[in-house]
Image (cartoon, helix red, strand yellow):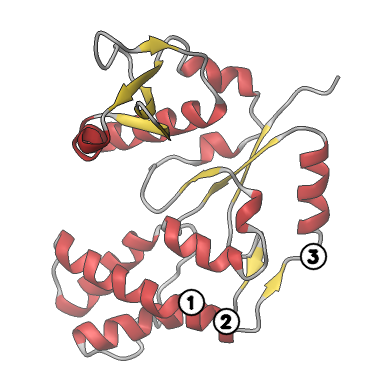
Amino acid sequence: MRPRQLFLFDIDGTLIGTMGAGLRALDRAVVELHGHERSCEGIRADGKTDPAIIIEILERLHGRAPDDTQIEAVLDRYLEHLRGEVERSPYKVMPGVGAALDLLDERGHVLGLATGNVARGAEIKLTRGDLWRRFGFGGYGSDSADRGRLVAHCQPEALLGLVEGCVWELIVPSADLPSFKQNHLISGTIRRSDGVHARVVSETPPNALAKPISPTLEDAYLYALTADRQAVAA
């Protein structure tokens, strides 16, 4: 039997080509919010997250680092324009992508995304090519400063070892779910008659009623990305 592996894919130039739809959408956002045209000229987007590109543009325009509110404003406006730019672009799914994904699915491998696109942007770009549905999870935007270590064809057992004994299930009242999400790392929820059954990734039980459950690759991936983000913040 072949060992199961985790395959993580980048988007632009790997899965699809949009002939610069993202940069055109970003240009439009910056014109509307900051009054500067052709703001993306000279910007190399390769290997950068969407927020990092926005920071680079605004620093160049204003000579200082933007605050979070400014970054989010440009990002929101960018996403408003992205769908139309993708629809109008000479879009293509890269040669061999469909066949490769089919083969990996047939062999039982796990498919995910590791991309600098924010999640909504990734969805917009991949939906036109009917590829978004092929990926169950992913790392987006600035989720991790070192996604490269997960992109390798790593064995799922190694990732699962990260969260062995660290995944819990408990019931959360629907009214308490928003505040619970702010304080816990949740990898999944299911609404049932007795409340929301939440799957929580934590090194300690989230409360006395939490029951330990077996981890999945989604749990491990979420944990790894969050660990990277916390390490950068520290």
Task: Pick whichever of labels 3 and 1 is earlier in the sequence.
Answer: 1
Q: Answer with left or right where residue 202 lies relative to residue 130.
A: left
Q: In the image, residue 208 lies at what x, y percent?
A: 25, 8
Residue beneath disc 3: 95
Q: Is residue 234 visible?
A: no
Q: Quadrant of residue 73?
A: bottom left
Above or below — where is 106 with respect to 25?
above
How packed mark 1 is, by other alpha carbons closer than 10 Å (few <14, some 14-19, many 20 or more), is many
Q: Is residue 30 visible?
A: yes
Determine the CA span between mark 1 and mark 2. 6 Å
Q: Quadrant of the C terminus?
A: top left
Is there a contact, CB below 8 Å, between mark 1 and mark 2? yes
Q: Which mark is residue 135?
A: none
- Amino acid type shown at disc 1: Arg
Above or below — where is 118 with respect to 110?
below
Q: Secondary structure at mark 2?
A: helix
- Amino acid type shown at disc 3: Pro
Q: Which mark is residue 87?
A: 2
Q: In the image, residue 38 lies at what x, y percent?
A: 36, 88
Q: Which mark is residue 83?
A: 1
Q: Secondary structure at mark 1?
A: helix
Task: Pick whichever of labels 3 and 2 is earlier in the sequence.
Answer: 2
Residue found 48% across the figure and 57% down from its top = 47
Q: Which mark is nearer the camera, 3 or 2?
A: 2
The one nearer the camera, 21 or 201, is: 201
Q: In the image, residue 37 lies at what x, y percent?
A: 31, 91
